[in-house]
Image (cartoon, helix red, strand yellow):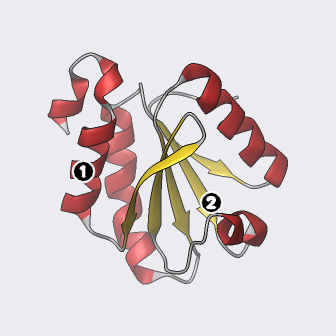
């Protein structure tokens, strides 16, 4: 279902739950971009996230539209867009709020340590 090296759009709660379950089983880092179609900074950061995703196939990148999956964004207490959540084994390990490229890259590098050295090439 999911391809490595890309940002995967999640459009249903069942798909969200499936990705979380897969992440728990694989122990891979999941980076979730909570976004909205009307959010300017979200549009700014999206291509940057896509570039990072290409370089890090050992990390799962998901994109959730807060208006489309309101229950998911409420459950994870997302209050501003974009918000990036970093999940490992189903648990929140970090969070970046805003279109902050440097902070985002640092957080990904910090948590993507299980990939065998690729994290330093962000």
Q: Residue 105's mark?
A: 1
Q: Residue 43's mark?
A: none
Residue 86: image location, x then y, percent: 45, 49
Which residue is found at the position 45% from the left and 71% from the top? 82
Task: Find numbered disc 2 in the image and state the secondary structure of the residue it sits on.
Answer: strand
Residue neighbourhood size for the residue with mark 1, other residues' Cα within 10 Å, grouped as few (<14), some (14–19), many (≥20): some
Which residue is found at the position 48% from the left and 76% from the top? 81
**Disc 2 and disc 1: Cα gap in Å?**
19 Å
Which residue is found at the position 72% from the left and 63% from the top? 72
Depth check: 8 or 76 in front? 76
Residue 66: image location, x then y, percent: 65, 72
Q: How many marks?
A: 2
Quarter of the rendering containing residue 48: bottom left
Depth check: 60 or 26 in front? 26
Which residue is found at the position 57% from the left and 28% from the top? 3
Residue 42 placement, left or right of 78: left
Up-down relation of residue 121 to residue 96 (above or below): above
Quadrant where the C terminus is found in the figure = top left
Up-down relation of residue 91 to residue 22 (above or below): below
Residue neighbourhood size for the residue with mark 2, other residues' Cα within 10 Å, grouped as few (<14), some (14–19), many (≥20): many
Residue at the far right: name it. Answer: 14
Task: Work out whether mark 2 precedes mark 1 in sequence or the reverse, and give the earlier one.
Answer: 2
Depth check: 62 or 87 in front? 87
Residue 45: image location, x then y, percent: 35, 65
Task: Find numbered disc 1 in the image and state the secondary structure of the residue it sits on.
Answer: helix
Up-down relation of residue 24 to residue 116 (above or below): below
Up-down relation of residue 42 to residue 112 (above or below): below
Residue at the far top: name it. Answer: 116
Kindly identify which residue carries mark 2.
64
Depth check: 4 or 34 in front? 34
């Amino acid at each position: 279902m999911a391809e490595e090296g890309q940002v995967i759009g999640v459009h249903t709660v069942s798909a969200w739950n499936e990705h979380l379950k897969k992440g728990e089983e694989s122990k891979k880092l999941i980076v979730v971009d909570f976004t909205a179609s009307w959010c300017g900074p979200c549009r700014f950061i999206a291509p940057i996230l896509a570039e990072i995703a290409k370089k890090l196939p050992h990390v799962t990148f998901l994109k959730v539209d807060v208006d489309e999956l309101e229950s998911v964004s409420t459950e994870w207490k997302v209050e501003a867009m974009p918000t990036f959540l970093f999940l490992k084994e189903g648990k929140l390990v970090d969070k970046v709020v805003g279109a902050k490229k440097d902070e985002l890259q640092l957080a990904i590098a910090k948590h993507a340590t299980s990939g065998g050295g690729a994290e330093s090439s962000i």
